[in-house]
Image (cartoon, rainbow, N blue to C red):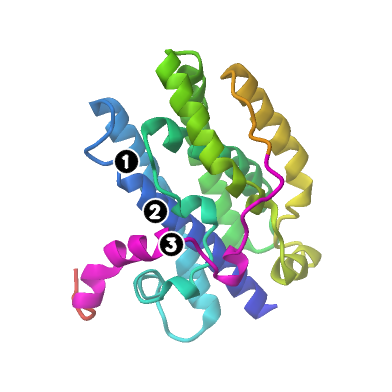
Amino acid sequence: MKDSLYNYTLRLGDTSLILAQRLSEWTGHGPFLEEDLALTNIALDIFGRAKGLLEYAAKKEGKGRTEDDLAFFRSDREFFNLLITEQPNGDYAKTMIRQSIIDCFDLLFYTELAKSKDLTLAGIASKSVKEITYHKRHSFSWVVRFGNGTEESFSRLQKGLNEIWAYSGELFEMNEDDHNLIKDGIAVDLDSLKQKWELEIKDLFEKANLVIPETLFMQQGSRKALHSEYLGYILAEMQSIPRMHPNAKW
């Protein structure tokens, strides 16, 4: 079970880390000042969650590594973040549609994880729920705003959904680690979340006049550390300074 808990926690930490890194790319580039600050703060919340999860993963690994070692000294074939988090931001409409899909899932997921028998995971989840509640309200409001705005804002929103939707199915993929930990009351059964997530997302899309793309294929691979070409570029930027100065003290 130790390896399963390490793998599970690492996967959650990686997903939060890469999503936060993507969102941080908007810092200084938001559509207006208040929104620039809002999205930067959301990224910081998610970075904080990533730190807690990776710190716990390092502890469970038991090899003397720290959360910084896990974040900055692994290659792309050692990361297990969801593929949706590494996709390019695109314009603000695409970023918000991606974020709404993730926020809706995360609020359901971390609400359930807060009930985990693993007290550390439950504690991280409880704190995260308070933050994600705001994140979801923020992204959902932007999706509705874009969907009912101008012809261009709606067009950009629909285009963003068309590009990102094929990565949404992976949110509910489970492997042996999940099943092992579900039996012990530690992990979340993702099958139990799917119907509620679908209802909430469909309701949001109806309010924004969006049409769900008709796709028969959902992208997968992150559970086996298989990624799109984008992750390598993210890591190159994120890890460059720590790798140049591995012994630096901040």
Query: Answer yes or no: do the residues labelled 3 and 2 have beta carbons within 8 Å?
Result: no
Q: Amino acid at mark 2?
A: Phe
For marks 3 and 2, give the CA distance. 22 Å
Residue 149 appears in the figure: yes
Q: Amino acid at mark 3?
A: Glu
Specify which label sits upstream in the sequence, 3 or 2.
Answer: 2
Give residue 238's position: percent from left, percent from top: 30, 62
Q: Quadrant of residue 178?
A: bottom right
Give residue 44's position: percent from left, percent from top: 35, 47
Residue lying at 66% horizontally and 51% vertically, measured from the top left: 218
Q: Which residue is mark 2?
A: 47
Is residue 118 toward the left or the right of residue 70 in the image?
A: right
| Circle 2 Cα neighbour tier, 10 Å, few/some/many (<14 / 14–19 / ≥20) | many
Viewer-nearest of discs 1 and 3: 3
Where are the magenta residues, as a range? 215-244
Camera-side residue of 87 and 112: 87
Q: Quadrant of residue 239?
A: bottom left
Dot 2: element: helix
Give residue 177's position: percent from left, percent from top: 70, 70
